[in-house]
Amino acid sequence: MTAEIAASGRPLAHIGLRHLARHPWQTVLMIVGIMLGVAVMVAIDLANAAAGRAFDLSTEAIAGRATHQIIGGPAGLDEALYVRLRVEAGVRPAAPIVAAYVTSPQLGNRPIQLLGVDPFAEAPFRSYLFAADAPRGGLAAGIAPGQEDPTAGLVAFLTEPGALLISEELARGHGLAVGDRLTLNVNGRLATGRLVGLLQGADALSRRALEGLILADIATAQELTGQIGRLDHIDLILPEGDTTAVARIASLLPADAQIVQAAARAGAVEQMTAAFRINLTALSLLALVVGMFLIYNSMTFSVVQRRPLFGTLRCLGVTRAEIAAMVLVEALAVGLIGSALGLGLGLILGQGAVRLVTQTINDLYFVVTVRGAVVAAESLIKGAAIGVAATIASAALPAWEAASSPPRQTLIRSSIEDRARRAVPLTAAAAAAGFVLGAALLAIPPRAFAALAGQGAGNPPPAVSLTVSFAGIFFVTIAFALLAPAATLALMAGLRPITGRLFGVLGRLAPRNVAAALSRTAVAVAALMVAVSVTIGVGLMITSFRTTVVAWLGQTLWGDIYISAPGPTATRSAAPLDPQVEQIARSWPGVVRVDVLRSADVGSPAGRIAVAAVSDRDLTLPRIFVSTDGGRAAAAEAVRRGAVLASEPLANRLGLPAHGATITLYTDRGPQAFPVAGIYRDYSSSEGVVMMQLDLYRRYWDDPAITAVALKLAPGNDVDAVVAALRARLAELPAGAAVLVRPNAALRNEALAVFDRAFAITAALQLLAALVAFVGVLSALLSLQLERGRELGVLRAVGLTVAQLRGAVLLETGLMGLVAGLLAVPTGVTLALVLIYVINRRSFGWTLEFYAEPTVFLQAMALAVGAALLAGVYPALRMGRMLAAEALRGE
Amino acid sequence: MANDGHEPLADPDFIRLVGLSKSYQEGERRRVVLDNVSAGFGRGEFVAFLGRSGSGKSTLLNLVSGIDRPDAGQVWIGDQELTAMSERERTLFRRHQIGFIFQFFNLIPTLTVLENVTLPLELGGTAPKAARAAAEPLLEAVGLLDRARTYPDRLSGGEQQRVAIARALAHDPLIVLADEPTGNLDEESGRAVLALLDRLTRQAGKSLLLVTHSVEAAAYADRVFRLHEARLVPQEARRDG
C-alpha cells in the first residue's frame, strides 16, 4: 500500500505545482507573505546575535579569563589593595584594571572602552599583548608586524605618558597610524594620547573584541580618567570551586571591597537585555504569524477553489492522505522559495535592525560596539527552518480540508456553505477554549517559572515566563479570530435592513452575499481583524506608555534647569561633576532651590544596583508610589531616619514585598541592610534604582562626588537666559565646556526621544506585520470576488449596470472591512491590556496607565474599511469590464 | 464481444448487489433512495439505469464504486465484498478496478490531454514512459491523439468527454461507471460519445454501468433498469446502438 502511495506522488505533485504556476498572483502573494515573515525574523535574530556577540566580546575583552573579580564602591578600589594582595598575600594570578568609556573625534565619536592594564600581570588574563601561538612569542608578539621595531612600541607603551594601543583594523578604519595623536573625551574631560603601536588579534574573535578597545598602561589610564591611585577592579583566576581561596581572599579585603564571580557580573548585565531581546523576537515572530495567516488564507482559498478537482481525484482512487500530501507539497514549494528569498531580504534588513537594536541597548542598558550584522549561519538555518515549518503548519488545516473533500461527481456549493454554517457554533466553542487557555497561560505568575528554573529572588523572570506570556497572547488573538464567522453572520443580519434602506436591492443583497459565502468571507475577515487588532494593541500600548512617561516626567522633573556631565549612555551618567558646579549654582542670582544628585552603581548580593542619592529634604514628594510602609508621611519620615525607596522595576526584579522589605548593599562600611520605606514608579531604567538621601549615602560611601544638579528659579526669571549664562560661566572651569546645562523642556524632550527611539523598531515591525496582513487580505478578497464571476455575470445578465455592479462589489468588501474593524476593537484593547499589564511588567517591571487614545480606534477602523475597499477596487473594475456572456460561460 | 442477449454471459453475477438500502436525512424526514435492492450484472455487460432526477441513480453508482456506503446490504465485485472494505481499501480498489466518466467531464485543468489520460496509470504506479505508451493508442481510438499536448479548456465538450472515456479505460479497469455522460453535450456529440463508449468498452470486455435519463442513451445497453420508488425495475432492452 505504501508503495502505491509513493508511486502516486509524482503525478499529484505535478498537478499541485502546476496549479501554483497557473495562479501566479496567488502564488506570489503566498511567497511574499512567507518571505517578509522570514526576513523580519532573520533580521531581528541577526541584530540580537550581533548585540549579544558584541556584549560577549566586550565582556571577554575586559574580563578575559578571569574567574573572579574584586570590586569596590562607586569610587573603585585603592591600588594599594592590589599591591598588598599580590605582594604581601601572594594572591596570583591577579591583574589590576582601570576601565572607562571614552569617545574620540579621531575614532568617530562613538563610545569605546579604555582599558588600563599592567602588562606584566596581563599574560594569564588577556592575549592582546601576548599572542601565545604567535611565532615570535613574548611580550611584543601581539603588536602588529610591519612596524620597524615592535619592541620599541611596547617600551613606549610602558614608559611614554599618554601612550595608547588600538587594533590594526580600528586604526585602518579611521585612517590612523602609529605616532598619531588621539583626543579622548573622558566624561567631559579632554585628554590627549598618542598611538605607540597597533595590536593584532590572534583570531577573528579577538580582532572583533579589539575593535571596541583602547589599551593603555594602568598609570596612563589613571591619568587620562583622573582616577589617580584608583582601580576599577582586580581580576583573579582561582581554581574552579575553590571556596577556601575565595574565603581567604575575602578575609583580606577591606569593608568597601568584595570578591565576586566574573561570570555572575557579566550574567547580570546580560539578563537585563534578555527581556528586551525576547520582546523583539516576539514581535518578529508576529510578522511570521501574520505571514502564516496569509499562507493559511491563500491555501484555504486554493483548496476551496479546487474542491471539484479533489472530488474528481477521490473518484479516480486518490486517497485522503495523498490529497493532503499534494497540498503540503505545494506549501513546501512555496515555503522553500519564500524562505530563500526571506533569508536574502533578512540579511539586508539585518543591517538596519542592528543599528536600531544597538542604539536602544546603548540608550537603555550599556555600551556595546557593533559595526554591522555578522552573517551567522545559525540565524540563517533557523530562519529557513522556521519559514518552511511555518508554511507547512499553516497549510496543515487546508490540507486536511482538501483531504476531506468527498469523492462526488458534482459538488454543490451550498453544501460547503452549509458545512461552514454548521461549523459556526464549533468555532465559537473553539474560541471559548482559546480564551480560557490564553488567560490561563497569562495568569501563571512569573515566580512560578523562576521556581521551576531553580532561581531565587534577585533575578529577572526567566525567558520562559515571557515566552509563555506571548503564547497566551497568541491563543487569545486566535480565539478572537475564531469569533469571525459568528460575528460576520450576526452583523450581516443586523446590517441588512440598514443597507437595504440605503442602497435598495443591492444593499439587501450585499450582506446576504457576505453571509452566504461564509466559508471564504470569514477567513478574510479574520485575517484583516488580526492585522488591525495588532495595530490597535501596539498603538494603544505605545500611546499609554508615552502618556504615562510624560505624566511621570512632569511630576518627577521639578527643576527648571539640570546640570550634568556627559555619560556614555543616554539615560545615565555616573560621571562626576566638578565640585565647583554646585557652588556656582547655589550662588547664582534668581535661584531659589538647588538639589544635587549622586548616581552610582554599588555592589549587592544580587549584583550591581544603581543608587540615586538626592539632597531633597523630602525625596518622597515628587514620587508616584506603588506602595508605602504606612502611607506617604510615614515613608517620608522613615527616609529621613535612614530608609531608602526602591523603584518598581527593582522591587519586581528582587521580588521585594510591598511592606517590611530591606535591601542589602555593599557599602564602604561593609554590607548594610537598608529598610525600604516605599516602592515608587520609575521609567528611567528597567534594572531599577535605589533612592536615598544624599547624607545617608555619604555616611556609608566615601564618595563626595555629585552627578547632577537641579535648579529652581524664582518666578519671572528667563530660563533660557539663565541657561546661556550658566553655560558661559561653567565653560571657564577645567573640562567645563562639556558640562551639559539643560532646561527642563530639553531634558524632557531628550527622555522622550530615547523613548521614541526605543519604540522605533517596534513601530517598524508593526508596520511590516500590517503590510503582510494587508497583502493577505488583498489576496483573499481578490480571489473571493474573482471566483464569483459567474454570479456577477448573472446579475449583469438580468440588467445590473456596470456602475451598480462595481458598487455591489465594493459594498460587500466594505462590509467585510467593517466587521473586521469592529471585531478588531475588543481584540486590540485586549492585546493592549495584556501588553501593558502582563508583558511590560514581566519584561521591564513597570506598570503603565492604560490610556485609550480615541484616534487609535479611528485609524484602525479607517485601516480596516480602507484596506477592504482598496482590495475590492481591482475586482470591481475587472468585473465591470467583463461581459455578462463571458462571465456566464466561465463556468 | 457484444452481448446482444443471445449469448450467455461468462460470469452473470460479476457485480452483485445484495439487499442494498440507502436513505438520506432531509430536514425532519428521511428520504429512502434505495430500498432492499438486489441485482447481478455480468462481466462485459452494458447496463443502463434510467430514472428521473433524484431517483437514486447516482447513489447507485456511488455505492458500486465504493464512494458511498449503504445503510444495509452488500456490494460484491467478483469475489471481493466492497462493503466490507475500509475507506482506504475502497479508494485503492477504485484506483485499480474502476473507470469513471462524469457529466461535467471533470478533466484536470492543469494537465494536458495526454497527462489526463496517463493519470490513472501513474497513480497505479506505472512509469511515465510506459503510461504514455499505453495512453496514446487510446487517444488515437478516441480521435484526439493530435490534441495530446492541448489543455482541456481548449477542447469542445464532446472532445473533453472523449478524453474522459480514454482516461476511464487507460488503467484497464474491471468496470466503467458513466454518470450522465451525454448530459452536458449536444445531440450529435452525445450520440458520438455513446457510440465510442459502447465500442471501446465492448472491445476491451469491460462491464459498463451507465446512469442516464435519456431513453435514447439507454438503447445502447444490453439490459436496462428503471429506478422507481427506490427499487430497480427491469425494462425491456431496445439495443439499437
Image: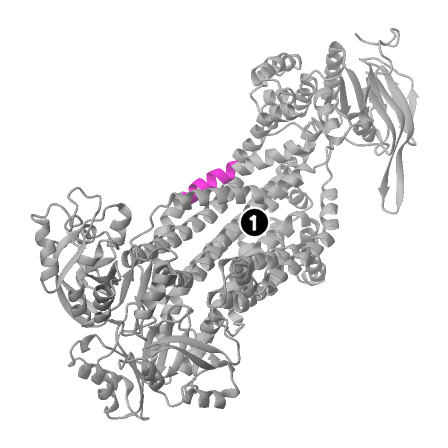
Looking at the image, residue A822 lies above or below residue A612: above
- Residue A876 falls within the magenta-colored stretch: no
Residue A67 horizontal/vertical position (percent): 33, 58
The image quadrant that residue A368 belongs to is: bottom left
Q: Nearer the viewer, residue A767 or A748?
A: A748
A118 horizontally vs B159: left or right: left
Residue at 59% across, 14% down: B130
Q: Residues within 10 Å of mark 1 (few under 14, many from 20)?
A: many
Residue A270 horizontal/vertical position (percent): 39, 60
Q: Nearer the viewer, residue A461 or A420?
A: A461
Identify residue for label 1.
A293
Residue A263 horizontal/vertical position (percent): 37, 59
Q: Chain of mark 1?
A: A
Residue A30 horizontal/vertical position (percent): 52, 43
**Magenta segment, which residues?**
A333-343
Looking at the image, residue B49 lies above or below residue A623: above
- Residue A337 falls within the magenta-colored stretch: yes
Q: Mark 1 is on which residue type?
A: Phe
Q: How is the image coloured?
A: one colour
Residue at 18% across, 58% down: A119
Looking at the image, residue B21 lies above or below residue A884: above
Can residue B55 be seen in the rendering of this structure?
yes
Residue at 51% across, 81% down: A660
The image quadrant that residue B151 belongs to is: top right
A579 horizontally vs A824: left or right: left
Label 1 SS: helix
